[in-house]
Image (cartoon, rainbow, N blue to C red):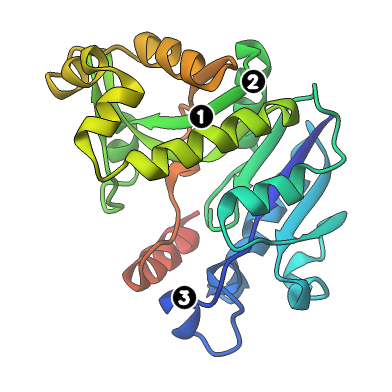
């Protein structure tokens, strides 16, 4: 069975401040249920998921919203530190499902499908994404940042597949990307002018992006395109809380 790591760390942000007592946005309630509890419920009900590890502030480990978790880890200041904490001690070669904690309408079929696709892709890093036409057909009211490729337009999902052995390479890449993100020349040096030009003109394919990402990581990177649009429905803004409540009530 697949181990799931749920990232529920981070400081109190504007979302949490809107609900007194919420440690961070994972503990913001939608329809009376914390976002992280809704995420955990879908994971716990999924036949392919075994152990569930939650990475969250230590003071929240006894919170009722985390009752479905099997193990708890302390979060870090940055997401890569939380991810490292969550993966510590896990089988380095096994595929781990890494999940955001703010997926209010995540479903069991979506989890099962993603795990199956991750196993079939057999990569070291599997980045979840959802195609735009599919997402807007189901959730037109949910805004996203879209990436346009020659074979489709996609947004990121809240699910990632990762083999723990790839974490050192992933951390190095994140550090390089963070250092280059505001410098076009540095980004070109990182990804290559050919890739940036093809992306800017809509000629870059997903397969070409996978190939370049694998080269940069030193590990096999794969895009995992989910047909379940709910994988990309998360809560980032205060206005999203009301949208999520409406979606939960309709589910």
Mark 1 residue crowding within 10 angstroms, few (<14) / some (14–19) / many (20+):
many
Tag 3's secondary structure?
A: loop
- Give the residue displayed 61% in from the left and 28% down from the top: 169
Q: State left or right for residue 204 relative to residue 158.
A: left
Report, in whole angstroms, how far the alpha carbon at label 3 lies from the one at label 2: 32 Å
- Give the residue displayed 60% in from the left and 56% down from the top: 101
User: Residue 13 bears which disc, if any?
Assistant: 3
Residue identifier under label 1: 127
The single residue placed furthest to the bottom in the displayed view is: 20
Residue 166 vertical position relative to residue 142 in the rendered view, above or below = above
Q: Position of residue 84 (x, y in %)?
A: 71, 46
Q: State left or right for residue 101 relative to residue 48.
A: left
Mark 3 residue crowding within 10 angstroms, few (<14) / some (14–19) / many (20+):
few
Report, in whole angstroms, how far the alpha carbon at label 3 lies from the one at label 1: 26 Å
For residue 45, say whether it is visible.
no
Residue identifier under label 2: 124
Mark 2 residue crowding within 10 angstroms, few (<14) / some (14–19) / many (20+):
many
């Amino acid at each position: 069975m697949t181990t799931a790591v749920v990232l529920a760390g981070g400081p109190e942000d504007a979302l949490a401040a809107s609900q007194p007592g919420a440690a961070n946005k994972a503990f913001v309630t939608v329809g009376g249920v914390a976002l992280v509890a809704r995420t955990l419920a879908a994971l716990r009900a999924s036949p392919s998921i075994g152990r569930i590890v939650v990475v969250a502030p230590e003071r929240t480990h006894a919170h009722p919203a985390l009752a479905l978790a099997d193990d708890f880890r302390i979060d870090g200041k940055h997401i890569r530190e939380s991810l490292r904490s969550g993966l510590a001690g896990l089988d380095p070669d096994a595929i781990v499902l890494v999940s955001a904690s703010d997926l209010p309408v995540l479903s069991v079929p979506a989890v099962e499908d993603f795990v199956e696709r991750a196993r079939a892709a057999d990569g070291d890093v599997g980045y979840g994404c959802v195609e735009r036409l599919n997402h807007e057909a189901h959730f037109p009211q949910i805004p996203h940042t879209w990436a346009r490729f020659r074979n489709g337009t996609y947004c990121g999902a809240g699910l990632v597949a990762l083999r723990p052995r790839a974490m050192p390479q992933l951390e190095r890449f994140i550090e390089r990307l963070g250092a280059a993100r505001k410098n076009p020349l540095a980004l070109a040096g990182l990804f290559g002018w050919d890739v940036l030009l093809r992306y800017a003109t809509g000629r870059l394919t997903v397969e070409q992006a996978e190939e370049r990402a694998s080269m940069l990581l030193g590990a096999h990177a794969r895009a995992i395109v989910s047909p379940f649009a709910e994988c990309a429905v998360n809560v980032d803004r205060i206005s999203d809380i009301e949208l999520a409540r409406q979606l939960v009530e309709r589910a």
